[in-house]
Every structure is written in C-alpha cells, then in structure tokens.
Image: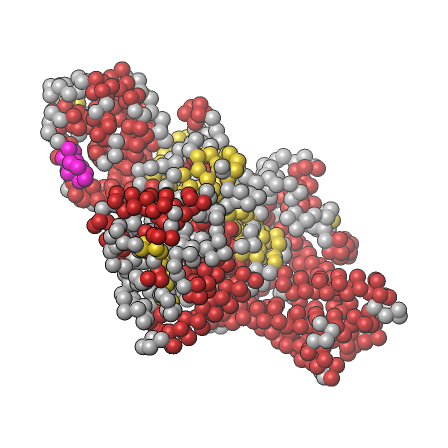
C-alpha cells in the first residue's frame, strides 16, 4: 500500500486528501442528514408530511411488498460508495502518510508505533462499516480543528481521527443523555405517578449543575443515567453491555410439546391470551430477520447505530426492536413483544405514538391555524420535547392479520348449533370416504363385529345425549338416531363422496360403507355430548365440549363405540378433522347460507380448505410450525380463562402485508428506564404493581419501555433470542447491489463469463449457428446436429436406485441424481468445461438445470440437464461398445433390457432426444447410461457417488451431503413436532435449497398420505446452521436444520428433533 498509486499522487498532489475530505463531507451530509430528514414523517419537525413519499404512503390497505423508490436506490449507492470507497481511501491514505512519522523515534518508536498504527487503522475501518452515520462529522471536524485552527496540537491525522472518533462517541452519548433528562423533567409535561414524584420535582431544581456533571461522568464511563424511583432525581448506574441484560431471560411458549398430557386434558395450560399471542411476535421476528438489514440499508428506518431502539406499532402488535450489533451486511437485533390488550397506561402511550399532529392549529393560547403542509407552532414545539420521534407511518412487513369472533354469539341459537352438527357429520363422511385406508377398514373383522348391530336396517341409537334441537337426522318417533333417518339426510352426500373416489364403492342403504359412516357419525356426536357433560342444550357446556373435541380430547365412554379401538387412525384422521372442518364451514354459512346445499360446491369447498387452510388447536405444535412456515391461512378455536370467566373465540389468521409505524426512541432513555426498574425491583425490593415508576409518561413512553424489560422485571409476552439479519436475504437490495462480494461469487462470475464466451464463439464458428440458438432451452435444436431435442427428462438415480426412465419432466419431483462420467464416450474437450462448472459449485449445477445449453464439438453435442450431460444425438462417439465391458456387466445389462418393455424403453429414449435402441444393439443408448453407471459402480466395489473420477460431476443434491468429519451420518426422528412440513413452499424462501427438485419434494405437498413418524430413520443429505457465512448452508432460526432422506421421501427437521445414530455404513 505504501507504493500505491494513490499515495504517489498524494505526494505529488497534496490537495488530493482535501478532495477526499470534501467528498466525504458532501456524501455524508446528503446520505445521513438530508435524505433521512426529507423521508421522515415530520421533516425537521416543521413539515406535516414527508417531502419524499413512498408509493404506499397514501394507500389505505397495502396488498404488496413495498415498492422500490428512486431515493432508496440513491441512498444505497451513496452508502455503498461511502463505506467501500471513500472511507477506505481516507484511512489508507492516512496510514501511508502517517506511518513513517508515528514510527519515528521522535514519536512512538517502531514497536509502539506499529501497534498504534494497527489499532487506529482497524478502529477507523471498522467504524466506517459498522456505524457510518456520524463518521462524516468526525472527519470534517478533525480536519478543520487540526489543519486550520490548532495545527500545532496535531499528532498526525491518523491518530487525530482515532482519538477524535472516541471523543465524538462520548459527546453523542452525552447529548442523548441530556436530551433524555431535559425531556423527562420538563415542568410543563411532567407526570407525577406518586406523591414522591411531586416532592422530588422541586427538590431536583437546585441540583441542576450536579446533574450535568453526573451526565458527563456517565457518558465517559458509558453507564445509564436512571431516574430514581421514576422521579426527576437522576443517579448514575453501573456499566452494562449493549445487550444490557447480563443473562438471557427469553420467554418460552407453553404448548403441548412441553407440558404433560394430564395437564393438557384437565387444566388446559397456556390458555391465556399472552401465551397464545406470543407466536405472532415470533413470526414477526422471522419476518424482520429476512428484511431488517436490507430495509436499514435502504433508509426505511432512518439513521441507526449500535444500541438504537425502535418501536413497531400496528393495530394490535407493539414491539420494541433493539439493535445489538451492526456489521458489514448484517444486523443482530432482539425483539420484545408487548401485550395485545395492555394496561390503561400502555394504551395512553400507544395513542400518543399513533395520533396525528397534522391537524393541530394551536399557537400558544389561540388557534389561528397553520401554513399548508406545515405544522402549527404548538405541534412543532411539542414534537421537539419528546424522547421519541415517528420515522415512518407505512413500514410494510409480511405478517398475519388476526380476526377473532365470539363463538358464543355464533352458536347462541339452536338452529346455528344444528348447522354446525350437520357439517360435523358431513365432514366425518368426507374424510372417511376419501381416506386411502377405507378398504382396509371395511375389511377389518373387528370393526365388522362392532358394527354388526348398526348394519340392521331397523337399528336406532337412543342415547340420551342426542338432541332433536341440534341433530337434523333425529327420529322423533323412535326418540333417537335411526339408520333409516340417517340415510334420508346423508345418503346423497355419501354417494357423491364415493363417486369422487378413483375406485367408487357400492353405496346403498345396506352397504358396509353406509354402516361405517353411520357408526362413525353416531360415535362423533356421542363424543361431543360426553365432552359437553350431556348438556348440549346449554351453550356453555356445548362450547366446552366443542373445544375439547377440537383439541383432540375424545372420551369413548360407551361400550357400543369400543370398536373404534381397532384402528385409532379413525379418530385421528377422520373424526378430529371432521370437527375442525365443521367450524370453518359453519363460518362460511354466514356469508352464503344455501350454497353448501349442493354436494359439488360443498365437496370443492372442503378440498380447497384442506389445501389452503391449516385448522389446528393453538396448543398443538403443528399450529406453531404452520405459523412459522408462513401458511396462507389458519383457523383455531381459542378458550381463554381470564379473571374466572370462560371465553371462546374463533381465531382466523390470513397472511398479508401489514403496515407498521416505526418510532425511534432515545436509546439513553431506554437504558436509563431499564436500569431504574432493575434498581427498584431488585435492590430496593419494591413489588408494588402500581408503583409510580411505571405510570404512563407520553414524552418518554415510560410504561411501554419499562414493560419491555426482561422478565421478571418487565412483562413482555415474547423476548426473542439474539437474531441476525443478513443483507443478501433482501431481494430488493440484491437487485441493486447484486449480492455480497465474496470469493465464491467472483469465481462463479468468472466461470459463467467464460462459458458465455465459449458458447458464443462455438456457436459463431459453426455454420448457421448463433448465440440465440445456444441460449434456448431443451426444446430447441442443437446447432450442427440437425436433431431436435425434447424437454429435459428427469431420469434420476438416487442412492444407487434407478428412477423410472419413462417418467417425463411433467412430474417435476425426483430424487438427487448422479451424472455420467466422461468415460461414456463423450468428447473430453466439450465435457471438461461443463464438468468443471458443476464440480466447482453445487449452486452452479442448479443454475445449469434451469437452462439447458447445447454444446457442439467435432465428436458430439452435449446437453446439460438435471441428470448430467446427455448426448443430444446418437452417434458412434456418444455410445459405449458392449465388447469393451466385462462379461458380468454385459449379462446384467441384457437382463435389464429384457425385463423392460420395448414401449417404455422407446419412450425413455425419445425423451432424451434419441431414437429407440433395441437390446441387441452393440452400443448403449444414453437413456441406459444410468443403469450402466450403477453396474460399473457395483463391479468396482464402490458406489458411483463416492468413486468420483476427476471428470465426474455430481448433482447439487449429492454434492451437498451433510457430513460431520466428511462422513455421511444417519439420524432417527424423536420429536415429529420439530418437522417443518411447509418450509419448502414458503414464499419468503428462508432456506436456500441445494436443488429445486429437493425443495419440491421436501414437504407435505409431495408426501400425500405419507407422514414422518417418531422412530423413522434416514440419512442427512444437507444441513443448514445458524449464522453461516454461506447462504446455501444458513439456517433461518437459531438452531440447525437438517434435510433427511427417508426411503424416497425428504423431510426438513430441526436438529433438536432427531437423534444422531452415527456414520452411515
């Protein structure tokens, strides 16, 4: 660096450094002062609206993600130039020009000088990346002070900048403390929470000078300055870290995964609103993890620095976001969620931060109005005496809109309860007729014996729990539910559901299917009556029983229903989904009462709800998994016991974009109030829940800040762990900057550029060739071959098993693959570049699978696909002679050809763009290469996945095998609740998958009727870990996530839900 061009120019042109100083002053002033001010809700506390508005500012309801504005792009580029070009140039310039002077005997000598140069250079470089907000002020003041005012005091500009950066950091902290103190004790807005506050207010006036000294001392030691018992008397506390709290008091959600079964059935733990609502703050944390760093760089939160605190406020969510650490392209934060229905004091402060001041027309004691687009005098004055300010009123973040309806009002009358019971019965019939185990249940001898009485056409169940007011098929003559009355009401529905099966069954009044449906429906309604204590006519009892069945608490009390124990899947897969689906259908009934009388409409509605709606109890771990997996819609029946009253609510969640207000709070105000609460509760032992220090103070948001303290000092309903947000997870930011600068990205860029050059030159050298032909996918003809290629087939080999060669690309879901080695007769020159591209990066093969290239060479044309490199046409050089293979392989290959039907073989070859090949041919077509690879691996005693030659190319899935010490290991599922069933379909793309085919297969959408169970074993093929530098292996939560292959299924599971079995042998 001492011989760099910049330093040589600096020696010849001393004015260069002043050009840099001027540049950093201009760029910093525009980036960190002008742009944030004109984008604020109240610029300079004078204007009544932002001068630069976003597209969503005037929208009542936002339906899409925030639109990128030109001033956001300008902010990003100015920040990029400032952090990555201007500040490094200044530091390198000062390092080079000051090194000789600092290391001279007159200054610090060689050893100490080298140490100071290193420390000062690293400090200044890191500050320019982690907190560039106020760096330009430090640089400009240092230059003016030591170059023009007091040049004699200068100890080289490098050391001057180093010490002045520390001094300015303390001065900014002192400024924040004084702003907090003056705002808190201003006599015209002081709020006395107790008699002590009224006494302390005048007593603190004579000690103002001492208060200023205290503020200076606390700023020097970076200690909080906290109000004593919430009064106007301030004292200095002890030093604390940026995180503030010495221990982790993260909240823990109570659900069925961490409570005993007996308590779940009897006491219903975790049924309070705060515990149930904490999941929404957890989801908000995930959303912020995805977008916070990018939004900060886009300037959507205004200026920020380490330790800053913001409040996110919406209709029901109020959370404090604490920035713990800021790095280059990452932000570590912690979120603290407050109660939905807070105390009176909290509500008054929420009103203060959400109310508008644009309509205020006051000027002292009169109301003459205000200038258009400007604030009135009173409003402008009051905004300057707050410890917080509104940054944005329309910050867009993906979340859930929450709708709750009282279940009591929806089931108040008997007719509405009868509608619910009818849908309950129809839901049971739907789930039993659509089950894949229906034939097994109909053939079960134990069930047939238990249902023998129900098979009688004249059978009637006269259980007293049945009620003519709520059972539509109640037979008044026989005082019960007879088989005949059941068929009159529901036989038409049973016939329709059976007709929608792939293999319709016999459905008449005497059929076994009708008998099974009748038995199940009687059992389900008897279970509802039993849970309601046989008091279905009473609304409270009916709701209690409905909630018990909704959460899966079925009590089989009648001997006539014990046949259900022959297969408990009937309860889990038929009756429980039936009662849950009935609640959703009952809600739909209010919007279209007669629409579901048509069986077709009802059937399609249930199918649609099954696909798009998650219905579960809020204590079920599946509910939490569905929320965190961004399911589009969810529904639950909530039972809240508050102050001895039972309240039942139907909770409906719909994922959409929410609008938040972003309020920036003075960080010294937060630190001081937190320290004051800790002192009062821990050291002074004040346990009074109505103590004066937590009463509302709108100018400082005292109640909201104190209630966000870690438990047990505060009472937040959710405290997240330290969570890191990365800039490369923000799609809009990636569109501007193109992702992070890393060795892997530089390498990929060079390789892709080389391939485009090679492809373009190769296409141009061939007759009639052009780049457009080469760029087309698998559906175009390869230049110079005169053969048209079909779409890329997904003919895959996974873990030594052979896929179905006749399966076309339309299926789209296939296991990982092993591509063909170069020994299969392909041209070495055309194969080397391709194999090198895929071999160097698993992600490169994924890109290659999305756009198929046709390479032309003197010997053959190769096409890249998800199965590797497949010859585009059949030629002597693209086939393997059977004469050169061992006799054992020849015999086994011929056996495979004989077993495979000729039609299927021909279809597979056509899909590869090849003419069909008969088994008697002396060469092997490309569509048989996968079989040959398996034989070669077996013959050699090694699997083809591990015996990779230099030219071998593994697919991304195989390249991304998760290894511990380079050994593939097996795991066993021990906690199915840790399985992320819908993470592969999340629009937010929390995880970067090694292969698109794996993503499509690793979820409930691909499993169909199969589901992972406890005790199942498989091997790990990919692993995501928290805070990984590589986005492809980075977990979106604070735990490792594994992709496990179980037979031909793929399961995404959190590492805490599996037991490691050791290396795979």
Observer-nearest of 1003 and 479: 1003
Residue 281 colored in magenta in the image: no
Q: Is residue 1013 above or below residue 40?
A: above
Residue 497 colored in magenta in the image: yes
* Colour scheme shown: secondary structure
Report how many numbered discs are placed on residues in the image: 0
Furthest residue toward right = 106
Q: Does residue 913 appear in this view?
A: yes
> In screen coordinates, is 164 left or right of 835?
right
Observer-nearest of 120 and 377: 120
Q: Report the residue at 27% width, 59% height from top.
A: 914
Q: Does residue 215 appear in this view?
A: no
Q: Is residue 807 above or below residue 144?
A: above
* Residue stretch rendered in magenta on the structure: 494-505
Q: Quadrant of the N terminus?
A: bottom right
Furthest residue toward top = 559
């Amino acid at each position: 660096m001492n011989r760099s061009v910049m330093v040589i120019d600096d020696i010849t042109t001393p004015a260069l450094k002043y050009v840099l100083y001027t540049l950093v002053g201009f760029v910093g002033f525009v980036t960190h002062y002008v742009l944030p001010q004109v984008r604020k809700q109240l610029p300079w506390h004078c204007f009544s609206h932002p001068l630069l508005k976003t597209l969503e500012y005037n929208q009542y309801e936002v339906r899409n993600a925030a639109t990128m504005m030109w001033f956001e792009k300008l902010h990003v580029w100015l920040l990029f130039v400032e952090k990555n070009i201007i500040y490094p140039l200044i530091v390198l310039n000062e390092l080079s020009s000051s090194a000789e002077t600092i290391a001279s005997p007159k200054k610090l000598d060689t050893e100490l000088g080298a140490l100071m140069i290193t420390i000062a250079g690293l400090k200044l470089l890191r500050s320019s990346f982690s907190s560039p907000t106020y760096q330009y002020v430090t640089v400009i003041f240092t230059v003016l002070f030591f170059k023009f005012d007091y040049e004699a005091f200068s100890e080289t500009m490098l050391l001057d900048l180093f010490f002045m950066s520390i001094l300015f950091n303390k001065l900014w902290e002192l400024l924040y403390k004084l702003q907090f103190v003056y705002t808190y004790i201003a006599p015209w807005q002081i709020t006395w929470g107790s008699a002590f506050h009224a006494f302390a207010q005048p007593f603190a006036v004579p000690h103002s000078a001492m208060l200023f000294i205290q503020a200076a001392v606390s700023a020097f030691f970076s200690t909080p300055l906290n109000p004593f018992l919430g009064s106007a008397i301030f004292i200095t506390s002890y030093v604390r870290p940026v995180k503030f709290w010495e221990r982790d008091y993260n909240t823990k959600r109570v659900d069925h995964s961490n409570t005993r079964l007996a308590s779940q059935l009897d006491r219903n733990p975790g049924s309070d609103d705060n515990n149930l609502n904490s999941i929404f703050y957890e989801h908000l944390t995930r959303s912020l993890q995805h977008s916070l760093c990018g939004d900060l760089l886009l300037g959507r939160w205004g200026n920020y620095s380490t330790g800053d605190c913001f409040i996110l406020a919406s209709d029901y969510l109020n959370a404090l976001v604490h920035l713990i650490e800021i790095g280059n392209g990452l932000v570590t934060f912690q979120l603290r969620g407050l109660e939905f229905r807070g105390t009176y004091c909290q509500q008054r402060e929420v009103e203060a931060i959400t109310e508008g001041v644009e309509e205020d027309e006051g000027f002292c004691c009169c109301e003459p109005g205000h200038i258009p687009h400007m604030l009135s005098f009173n409003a402008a004055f009051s905004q300057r005496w707050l410890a917080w300010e509104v940054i944005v009123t329309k910050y867009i973040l993906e979340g859930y809109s929450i709708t709750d309806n009282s279940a009591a009002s929806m089931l108040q009358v008997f007719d509405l309860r009868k509608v619910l019971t009818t849908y309950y019965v129809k839901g049971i019939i739907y789930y039993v007729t659509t089950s894949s185990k229906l034939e097994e249940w109909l053939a079960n001898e134990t069930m047939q014996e238990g249902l023998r009485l129900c098979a009688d056409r004249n059978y009637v169940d006269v259980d007293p729990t049945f009620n003519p007011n709520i059972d539509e098929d109640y037979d008044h003559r026989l005082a019960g539910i007879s088989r005949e009355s059941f068929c009159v009401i529901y036989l038409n529905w049973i016939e329709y559901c059976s007709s929608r099966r792939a293999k319709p069954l016999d459905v008449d009044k005497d059929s076994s299917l009708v008998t099974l449906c009748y038995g199940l429906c009687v059992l389900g309604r008897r279970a509802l009556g039993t849970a309601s204590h046989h008091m279905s006519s009473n609304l409270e009892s009916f709701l209690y029983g409905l909630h018990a069945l909704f959460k899966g608490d079925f009590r089989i009390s009648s001997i006539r229903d014990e046949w259900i124990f022959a297969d408990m899947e009937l309860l889990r897969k038929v009756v429980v989904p039936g009662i849950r689906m009935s609640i959703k259908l009952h809600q739909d009934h209010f919007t279209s009462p007669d629409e579901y009388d048509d069986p077709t409409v009802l059937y399609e509605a249930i199918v649609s709800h099954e696909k798009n709606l998650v219905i579960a109890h809020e204590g079920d771990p599946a509910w939490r998994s569905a929320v965190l997996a961004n399911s589009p819609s969810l529904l639950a029946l909530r039972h809240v016991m508050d102050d001895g009253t039972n309240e039942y609510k139907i909770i409906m969640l719909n994922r959409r974009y929410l609008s938040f207000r972003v309020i920036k709070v003075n960080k010294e105000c937060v630190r001081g109030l937190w320290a004051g609460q800790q002192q009062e509760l821990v050291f002074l032992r004040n346990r009074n829940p109505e103590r004066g220090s937590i009463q509302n103070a709108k100018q400082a948001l005292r109640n909201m800040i104190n209630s966000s303290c870690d438990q047990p000092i505060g009472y937040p309903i959710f405290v997240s762990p330290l969570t890191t947000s990365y800039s490369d997870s923000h799609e809009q930011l990636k569109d501007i900057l193109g992702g992070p600068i890393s060795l892997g990205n530089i390498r990929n860029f060079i390789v892709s550029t080389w391939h485009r050059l090679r492809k373009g030159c190769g296409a141009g050298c061939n007759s009639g060739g052009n780049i457009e032909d080469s760029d087309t996918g698998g559906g175009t003809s390869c230049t110079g071959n005169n053969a048209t290629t079909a779409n890329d087939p997904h003919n895959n080999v996974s873990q030594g098993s052979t896929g179905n060669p006749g399966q076309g690309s339309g299926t789209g879901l296939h296991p990982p693959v092993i591509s063909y080695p170069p020994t299969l007769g392909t041209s070495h020159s055309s194969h080397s570049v391709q194999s090198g591209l895929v071999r160097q990066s698993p992600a490169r093969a994924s890109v290659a699978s999305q756009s198929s290239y046709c390479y032309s060479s003197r010997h053959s044309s190769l096409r890249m696909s998800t199965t590797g490199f497949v010859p585009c046409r059949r030629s002597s050089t693209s086939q393997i002679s059977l004469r050169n293979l061992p006799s054992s392989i020849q015999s086994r290959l011929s056996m495979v050809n004989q077993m495979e039907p000729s039609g299927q073989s021909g279809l597979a070859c056509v899909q590869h763009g090849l003419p069909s090949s008969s088994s008697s041919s002396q060469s092997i077509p490309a569509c048989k290469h996968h079989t040959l690879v398996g034989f070669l691996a077996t013959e050699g005693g090694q699997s083809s996945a591990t015996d990779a030659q230099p030219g071998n190319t593994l697919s991304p899935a195989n390249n991304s095998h998760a290894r511990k010490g380079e050994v593939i290991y097996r795991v066993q599922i021990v906690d199915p609740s840790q399985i992320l069933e819908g993470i592969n379909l999340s629009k937010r793309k929390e995880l970067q998958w090694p292969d698109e085919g794996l993503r499509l297969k690793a979820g409930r959408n691909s499993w169909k009727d199969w589901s992972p169970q406890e005790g199942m074993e498989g091997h790990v093929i990919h692993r995501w870990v928290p805070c990984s530098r590589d986005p492809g292996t980075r977990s979106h939560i604070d735990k490792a996530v594994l992709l496990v292959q179980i037979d031909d299924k793929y399961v995404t599971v959190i590492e805490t839900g599996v037991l490691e079995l050791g290396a795979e042998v």
